[in-house]
Amino acid sequence: MTNKSNNGFNSWQKSFEKETKKNFSDAKSETDEGIDIKPVYTKDDLENFSFVENNSLPGQWPYTRGPKASMYTNRPWTIRQYAGFSTAEESNEFYKKNLESGQKGLSVAFDLPTHRGYDSDDDLVMGDVGKAGVAIDTVEDMKILFNNIPLDQMSVSMTMNGAVLPVLASFIVAGEEQGVDRSLLSGTIQNDILKEFMVRNTYIYPPEPSMKIVADIIEFTSKEMPKFNSISISGYHMQEAGADNVLELAYTLADGMEYVRAAMSKGLDVDDFAPRLSFFFAIGTDFFMEIAKLRAARTLWAKIMKDFGAKNERSLILRTHCQTSGVSLTEKDPYNNIIRTSYEALSAILGGTQSLHTNSFDEAIALPTDESARIARNTQLILQNETGVTKTVDPLAGSYFVENLTEELSKKAWDIITEIEELGGMTKAVKAGIPKLKIEESATKKQAKVDSGSRVVVGVNKYKNPKEPSVDVRVIDNNRVRDDQIKKIQAIKKSRDTRAVEKALANLTNAAKDETNLLTPCIEAIKLRATVGEVSKALEQVYGRHFAKSLSVSGVYGKHFEGDKDFMKVEKKVIDFENANGRRPRVLVVKIGQDGHDRGAKIVATSFADMGFDVDMGPLFQSPKDVAKDAIENDVHAIGVSTLAAGHKTLVPELMKALSNIDPKSKIIVFVGGIIPEQDYEFLYKNNVSAIFGPGSNIIECAEKVIDLISDNLSKE
Amino acid sequence: MELIENIQKGERAAIAKAITLVESSKDSDQQLSRQLISELIKKPGKSIRIGFSGPPGVGKSTFIESFGSYLVTKNYKLGILAIDPSSQITGGSILGDKTRMVEISKNPNTFIRSTPSRGTLGGISMGTREASIILDAAGYDFIFIETVGVGQSEIVASNLVDIFTLIVGPGSGDELQGIKKGITEYADIFIVNKNDGELKIEASKTAADYKSALSYYKKLDKLEKQVLLVSAIEQTGMKEVIKTINQIVDQNKQKGIFEERRADQLKFWIEEEVKNIIASDITKRLSSKGSISKYSEKVMKNEMSMFEAVETITKDTLK
Ligand code: B12
Ligand SMILES: Nc1nc2c(ncn2[C@@H]2O[C@H](COP(=O)(O)OP(=O)(O)O)[C@@H](O)[C@H]2O)c(=O)[nH]1
Ligand SMILES: [Mg+2]
């Protein structure tokens, strides 16, 4: 007998309808994923599952309840905080302090030049050195980074994808020169290139050779580094770029399948490498959804790997790192972020993550200070030591709601995975740009919900703090870091055996022309003190550099504002502008330098276009000179610079210079959006920036201000 | 005008502002624009204008990036007018062509201007023609015009250029039946793009389809139409394209076709413009008199036939 037909449920339903004055069947709320959440779940909702098995146990098929039988009751999750900034020396100091304060594993954040395979002395990266991570040019930097940190004892995670070969090679050589054999190194290299093309944007080579490099690393580590995770298949960045949980889940697992195939195509048996595949997910604010996602991910992966013919149980088990969501954190009223992060962390724990990074409350302002990093770490220490959450494995198992949600998510993700597989797999899909577009669509919808107020963000669009607190900010002097790095590079270039380095690099270029595993010749070159940039260039000679073709969504933002007063007001201003000036307001939205955060720029561009602007969208990685040429040739009224990776103080003045170099009388106005600490506002205004739009800006308000500024500027003729 | 001198000196900002003028819908801008153009045509440059047309997504922008990069290494100066079709839905538009022209847009020997199409004739307006006059006066060797090729707009686009190129994708040969005669009149070169990877076989097949279809019309036209295979992404086939372009230009010049075409195009544009002016004038008269609604009422009430109404209105309006 089912619950719904029994009297208990009927009388509950009556009471519910009386209290809410709503029909039970209408009382649903739809999530971003398009899942209807009911106000109550019952035993009925545990029926007809195709993925979740109701009576499974932790550490057992299908691993919904966790990869291990004992989970945190035996050993809590690893507190692994992602960090890195300026020079190797400073990052090393920071790591050592953190380890003393209870952190258990290291996770290295590299700067953007390193990610993209440029040395610190390259002109293209002038504004980016040491700004958003640590600069590594040679193995000497890598050795400094791990100075007094024994690499046979410390597990080290490295977020590196584009320049994965020289960086992993440097890590291996640094270990060796510390006296640690590579077989003893433990940790993870991210090595997940597909999501770079989709959302993270630190690719170097085109998709095919990039996939070959991924497979090389899997092959090498499976043979020579048994304690090292060859890849961290990442959905994290997708959610941060705007994906909902179904998209994150589906694309991540589909990526995983592609990597499995790539490794198998090298002749490896699936069980040779599958136990060393690891995952990485984001944990956002939708509390139960995130828990369900981790449970669903394990369930689906077990099925996928079984289908690949895995025999070893460890090949079936999905192990994951998680990070709380940065994008859920706000610049406004920033102490709220401590609270958000705590709930997200709890979600990750209830979902059964193996390791966790918790964000600092100054996330939307700059890289964390020592103090904000301490609070972030303590969030996890408190969970581990004070709340009792480690005492029971998978405590939400059997919850009608959570089990049902796990099944729903699995189903929806599976549909997408099947679709992608039918189209020929994720590499193909990524090349066609479809997943990126889907994620941007989802991101644009989220922005529209916040801007229209239908989604509340405390302190941003409701319950604003009338007295915003001022917080300390970590300041990095990138010119000093760059000078230091250049000096180090010069010294190394003087003392090394140049002929031998050239020969090793030539070997590497040759190896890239056939099927040889590239890590071995990389290690040779790095040992001889070739730089990360030189190694990347040696490969670039064969593979070329990849330029992304970007597509844009259209109409997604505007659709949310049909009949909206403020939206229509801007639309009208645009038409009035056109009547007065013979054309629409035309704005060039750009990213400058190596900053690959394109979520904001893309959303602003499509939203402005929906309001009637003509928007020129610049490609990624432009120099200030490129931007100026583009702006002047198209005679735009304004340039909107979207900058999140802290290059603004170098790059914006350069842009101003470049504009007046081409046209001394240029009347193009410049405004800036993104991560700008308040301390820098004055500097930018002094450099003739017309307006600054920080995180949380309402885009309709941005558009109105921009059109007003343009009109003012034109009337100054 | 100072503007004219600066254009002739090749100053980027001057060229850009002049294009804004010719594209502007403001009356005062239109007047300035006319003066400007009548001055500029007195000192014509030596540009060859080439049109690249084809359906969205076949790789026109990518091809221009690839072909353009090849030309700039040969020290040619390249002006590019990209009519971006990506507007329709909202009235505003995202001009993203430049994200496909990353390399050439950095080159100092290029000038790239995107124009939102607003849905009219694939975006080609008088503005586009005038913009190419400006680039010509500014000393660009080649002027590329990227347009979306759909029906009518091909005729208009082909009247803007000395050589008209249709870019097609692998597998598009099937559509040949429908295209038939029309297209061969307007296009000089057919470029089958995406001749790479898995698409190679299909691309060759498509090229063969075009060749055989065109050989039929060879007898009718005086000129031989060329079919070329390229990959914009792998930058293959570019030498052939420039060779073919040069050949056609030389040949047309020798035979006098080059000038003849320009003269024909002039006629076309004069006629277009006259028609436009008359049409807008008549529209104005019609609406000021209100005759349409007046007579349609009568037709509705069966007081007169539709034919009679049309005749009366026409006479009345043209008076
Ligand atoms: C999402 C995100 C990512 C995603 C990016 C996905 C993508 N494709 O964009 C992922 C996970 C990939 C990522 C990666 C990295 N990130 Co990140 N990331 C963020 C995060 C959490 C949110 C940014 C965001 O997209 N917000 C949502 C959008 C809609 O908001 P927005 O861009 O701010 O835009 C709004 C306004 O600023 C304004 N605006 C912005 N631009 C423009 C332009 C115009 C014309 C106008 C009118 C308005 C306007 O309007 C928008 C609407 O409100 C921020 C922290 C934060 N909370 O802001 C860190 C942050 C920007 N990241 C940071 C770092 C360090 C990185 C990495 C470099 C880490 C590393 N070392 O590997 C990498 C590398 C990425 C790269 N290639 O550059 C740092 C930068 C530090 C700094 N500035 O000092 C931040 C600040 C986090 C931190 N505190 O450490 N990141
Ligand atoms: N395989 C392949 N794809 C191409 C080639 N040229 C362009 N493309 C792809 O086709 C899509 C559309 O290209 P785009 O230049 O924007 O086309 P347009 O709309 O005609 O300008 C992009 O995804 C390109 O990467 C090519 O030569 N080979
Ligand atoms: Mg195009």
Image: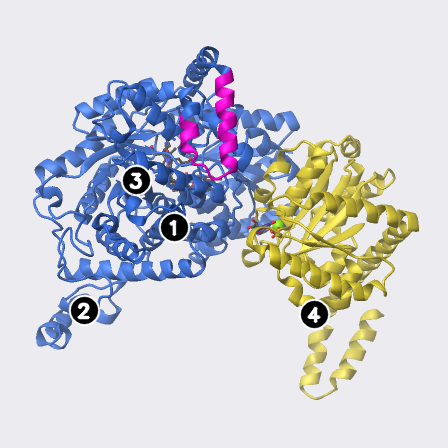
Q: Is residue A514 magenta?
A: yes
| Chain letter belonging to callout 4 | B
**Residue A316 in the image, given as x and y percentages of width and height:** 24, 51
In the rendered view, tell whether residue A304 sits above or below residue A337. below
**Residue B247 in the image, given as x and y percentages of width and height:** 82, 47
On the image, numbered disc 4 is attached to which residue? Answer: B178
Q: Is residue A645 visible?
A: no
Same chain for mark 4 and mark 3? The answer is: no
Q: CA distance from mark 1 to mark 2?
A: 34 Å
Q: Is residue B234 visible?
A: yes
| Chain letter belonging to callout 1 | A
Residue type, label 3? Leu
Chain the render paints yellow = B
> Which of the numbered marks, if any, corresponds to residue A47?
2
| Chain letter belonging to callout 3 | A
Q: Which residues are magenta?
A: A499-523
> Which of the numbered marks, if any, corresponds to residue A261?
1
Q: Are marks 3 and 2 in contact (CB under 8 Å)?
A: no
Mark 3 lies within 8 Å of ligand 1 (Cβ measured): yes
Q: Main secondary structure of the magenta part?
A: helix
Q: Are marks 1 and 2 in contact (CB under 8 Å)?
A: no
Label 4: how many residues lie within 10 Å, few (<14), some (14-19) or many (20+)?
few
Q: CA distance from mark 4 to mark 2?
A: 55 Å
Res A193 quadrant in image: top left
| Quarter of the picture holding the C terminus of chain A | top right
Residue at 29 percent of width and 44 percent of height:
A272
Chain the render paints blue = A
| Quarter of the picture holding the N terminus of chain A | bottom left
On the image, numbered disc 3 is attached to which residue? Answer: A329
Q: Is residue A550 magenta?
A: no
